[in-house]
Amino acid sequence: MAHFSENSRTLEIVHSLATNRDELFSACKDSSDVCVIALPASQEPTQLNQPLQGVGDLIAEASKNLGENVTLVVLGEVIDLVQVQSKMPDKFMYQHWIAIKRETVIDGDQRRLPHQHFGALVYTGYKASLRHTKTRIEYTYCPVCDKTTKDYGGKKHTYHEAGTLISDVWRDIACDLGGDLSEVLERLADLFGLEPYKSLTVIDMKPLGLYRQFHPIVHFEFQENQLPQELMNKILNGDCLEELHTIPDNSIDFAFVDPPYNLKKKYSGYSDDLEIQDYFKWCDEWIYELSRVLKPGRTLALLNIPIWAIRHFLYTQTILKYQNWIVWDALAFPVRLIMPAHYTILCFTKGESRELPCFTGESTHIRLSSAPKTFNAFEPLADGFCLRENCVDTRIAAKINDRTRLTDVWSDIHRLKHNSRRVDHPTQLPPHLMYRIISIFTKPNESVLDCFNGSGTTTLAAHQLGRKYVGIEASEKYWRLSNERHQEIFDGLDPFRKMERLLTSKNSPVPRLKKQVYKVPKKTLQLEVKRVAGEIGHIPSRGELIQFGKYPIEYYDKYFISWGEVTAAARNTGMVEKRKLEKSQNIVQQLRLLENKKEFKN
Ligand SMILES: C[S@@+](CC[C@H](N)C(=O)[O-])C[C@H]1O[C@@H](n2cnc3c(N)ncnc32)[C@H](O)[C@@H]1O
């Protein structure tokens, strides 16, 4: 699929092979351009678990030769990129983990989810945020109704005709790491096609003949223990480490955690800003405890942002066996340059994994009313199909297959945006994310543990799915809240139902204004700003809008949360929902117009 990079001077792609270490080092020597190192792919499923011997040290050594303006991209399997990041010299700034869809899915032998992505670690020699062109990905259209896959509602005039801004999950293209990477390379050549870069050097590491380290399978032959009655179906109010000590070894069937990310989130009764070393020391302690209470063959799943997941990986691989790196593409609509859109759900097992209940038929999809109509735990909605109710109904009536295979890339579950389903917790997960995770890894009646239970999404989902649960939550407020919500299930209510709630900024990821009656619709005001921009040849300042606009400035002050929102339509071409003929030609023309202020005026 097409991408469009504004004002890009596409870089020349230069290929080089590294048949030995010296060739690798000399290919990197003094490069201040864009350097892509392509690591070899795993040849078979078992190798997804086996890192390339010494790969972290080798890339670290080679990177020392790179110039200070360089952008370095390392393409590789998860297991190798984790080792690379652990050894990367401090002079390099980590910028992104981009998850790229694989063309050929690698089967998971029923013990793991089929594997469908590899990664691109992006570093810079400079410390500022990543410099790249504004790159957009063409909109996709539903194969049934032919409208854009996402419904852009009444905001189409503020979006760009060329597509959505690129995020850190590339699902619109699919390549194999060991195969033809040209789509990825062409995208990188456009993405970084700006001063001072001239070329993109691709160093293929395959000929170097690195071999993969065999990881011995650790067998745990411990007896499984019973979860004591007094812990069964309880939410404990306390510190995770203290409470975990009360849980017997080998007594839990599945542990899930969505820990505080140490990103200064405003939790009730917990400060989310430890020194980074202290934060990870603390994380290692509860990961250890979780692995202790897990039964052999069972899974610990840990949700975090990719850079923190790498650090958790490095510790967890010393005690548990790597199972899956699930890419949860959670964002409905990227609005920033390479918007971080995904979370990692890191899965490790105690010894060799058992065959997963979702594959053995011991766990079935249960339809719950709070999940969207299109949601199925084991059969995700295929890319491209829309969620418009009438289109969904048409597909059901016409028995159109809009499903795809469940792999380790999930894009059919979005973060909770709507206030009506949110409770008073800042980082509440969507319930159907937990329906899927719990249904994959557990059978009915098995036990689920979450030691950062928050508003209770994990234990509530487990409860609804007929699993046993144990939750731990430090904040008394959230502990109380989750208990009340479990009581709702006992009372026959759905704790995730839509509710009439007052809009508050606290419960929403975006600041909210009070509902109000607009004297002039917001769309009209935004289009007026666009008209003024066309007239004066640039985006107007507040003063210029007062001078040239026809509506009182008070409306803008009162109705919009930022100047960015006021000027959103002026900065964009606007989009149409229906697919257009000769679309790509139009888009290219439109981008040229935007580059030229004079033409923009017309
Ligand atoms: C990211 S939130 C989890 C949100 C949860 N998944 C949900 O959907 O509501 C992390 C939670 O961990 C809790 N927490 C922080 N430190 C803790 C500790 N030491 N022990 C137990 N819980 C803790 C916070 O109060 C917060 O509710």
Image (spheres, grey):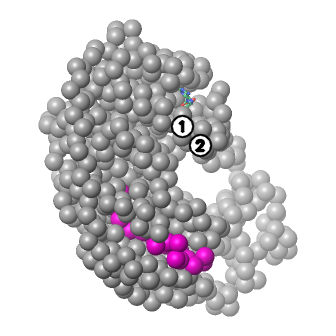
Whether residue 193 is visible here, answered yes or no, is yes
Q: Is residue 239 left or right of residue 393?
A: right
Helix, strand or loop for disc 2: helix
- State the residue lying farthest toward the top: 230
Q: Residues within 10 Å of mark 1 (few under 14, many from 20)?
A: few
- The residue that label 2 is drawn on is 277
Helix, strand or loop for disc 1: helix
* Quadrant position of residue 501: top right
Q: Residues within 10 Å of mark 2 (few under 14, many from 20)?
A: few
Residue in view at x 28 percent, y 14 percent: 226
- Contact flag, marks 1 and 2 (Cβ < 8 Å): yes
Residue 81's place in the image compared with 540, above or below, is above
The magenta segment is 62-78
Whether residue 99 is visible here, answered yes or no, is no
x%, y% of residue 564?
69, 63
Q: Is residue 573 left or right of residue 142?
A: right
Identify the disc placed on residue 281: 1
Name the amino acid, label 1. Lys
Name the amino acid, label 2. Gln
Q: Nearer the viewer, residue 475 or 352?
A: 352
What's the CA distance linking mark 1 and mark 2? 6 Å
Residue 58's place in the image compared with 315, above or below, is below
* Quadrant position of residue 56: bottom left
Q: Is residue 381 left or right of residue 287?
A: left
Residue 504's place in the image compared with 78, above or below, is above
- Magenta stretch contains residue 463: no
Residue in view at x 47 percent, y 55 percent: 86
x%, y% of residue 560?
71, 56
